[in-house]
Image (spheres, helix red, strand yellow):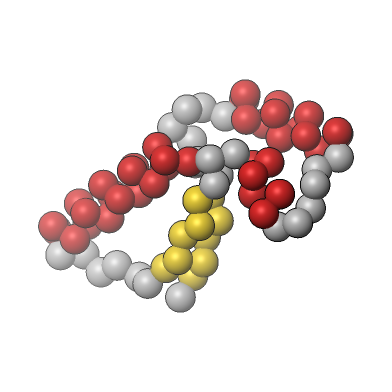
Amino acid sequence: MKTKVMIDGFEGHVRRSLDRATKMERGEYLESEKIITFADPVDMLDCLGTAPSSQEFEQIATDRKARKPHDAS
C-alpha cells in the first residue's frame, strides 16, 4: 500500500475523491493507498517536527505562488 502526503488542502481532497468515484463507476481497479493531506506546507513541516528556516519558508511561499490553483504537486 502506498502512502502519499499532499499539500493541496480540501480542494485536492475533493478532486481526488471525485476521480476515485469516477473510476469506481467505470469498474476500474483501485490500488489501496493512504493519503495524508495538509492545507499548507508549513503545517506539514510543523507536524513532522521540523520548523522551516526563513529561507525554506520563503522558498515554500514562492513555490506556492507559482503553483497553479489546480496543481497538486
Q: Position of residue 41 (x, y in %)?
A: 64, 42
Residue 25: quarter of image: bottom left
Position of 73 with respect to 13 (left or right) is: right
Of residues 22 and 61, the one nearer the viewer is 61
Residue name at image x 67 percent, y 54 percent: 47
Q: Position of residue 34 (x, y in %)?
A: 45, 66
Of all residues shown, which one is farthest toward the top?
A: 65
Image position of 21 with respect to 65: above or below: below
Of residues 46 and 28, the one nearer the viewer is 46
Residue name at image x 25 percent, y 69 percent: 29
Whether residue 10 is visible here, answered yes or no, is yes
Residue name at image x 49 percent, y 70 percent: 2
Of residues 14 and 62, the one nearer the viewer is 14
Of all residues shown, which one is farthest toward the bottom?
A: 1
- Tag count: 0
Position of 54 with respect to 38 (left or right) is: right
Whether residue 73 is visible here, answered yes or no, is no
Q: Quadrant of the C terminus?
A: top right
Q: Position of residue 72 (x, y in %)?
A: 49, 41
Residue name at image x 21 percent, y 64 percent: 28
Q: Position of residue 10 (x, y in %)?
A: 42, 40
Of residues 32 and 38, the one nearer the viewer is 38
